[in-house]
Image (cartoon, helix red, strand yellow):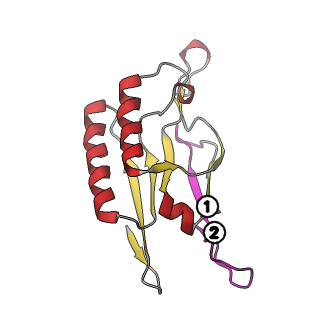
Amino acid sequence: MKATFGDLSSIFLVVVYGLNHAFGRRNLWADMRYLGTVIGDNPWIQLGDFNVVQRPNERLMGFDQATAYDFNDCLESLNMEDMPSRGFWFTWSNRRGGMGVNKSKIERVLINSAWLDKFSDSEVVFLAPGVSDHCSIVVTVMPAFCDSCFPCQKTL
């Protein structure tokens, strides 16, 4: 989604669902790289279920270094990083107990440097899972150019 403001600046929002197999996600990484060329230096936020982790500490049961490498390579090429967050670290669980438990940080909110410049006080909260096995994502956007006289907090 593209939003344009009165000053004609634009921001881009992409909602992601990454397939649960590496081949399908490689297509997603290619699509993200293409979008990066279209979006250019505009503020860009991507959020959703990427179905992959970046680091070993983001998954309790097993770590696939090759898929993490592909994901990290894509993010590095786009100069995207995780938005500062609060709440639950693991954003998905298989809801089993004991030795069968599996938890991962597969939901993410990614931003580029232009987003960080324009919305430096943005943050994400990963809420407790309810009925779903995934955490809900709440993004709060506070533009850096806001002053106290103009209420401009927006929640995505």
| Residue 121 falls inside the magenta stretch | no
How many numbered markers are drawn? 2
Residue 65: image location, x then y, percent: 41, 23
Q: Is residue 45 visible?
A: yes
Disc 1 designates what residue?
Answer: 122
Using the image, determine if residue 128 lies above or below residue 144.
above
Q: Are marks 2 and 1 in contact (CB under 8 Å)?
A: yes
Q: Earlier in the sequence, mark 2 or mark 1?
A: 1
Query: Is 27 on the left or on the right of 113, as rendered?
Result: left
Q: Considering depth in this image, is 39 or 86 the residue closer to the camera?
A: 39
Residue numbers of the magenta segment: 130-155
Using the image, tell me which numbered label, if any, was put on residue 65.
none
Q: Is residue 110 above or below residue 153?
A: above
Residue at horizontal 68 percent and vertical 80 percent from the top = 151
Residue 146 colored in magenta in the image: yes
Q: Nearer the viewer, residue 39 or 99?
A: 39
Three-letter code for the amino acid on which mark 2 is drawn: Met
Q: Which residue is mark 2?
A: 142
Is 9 left or right of 147, judged from the image as shown? left
Q: To which quarter of the image does residue 148 belong?
A: bottom right
Residue at screen point 46% across, 22% down: 63
Q: The residue under label 1 is which amino acid type?
A: Ser
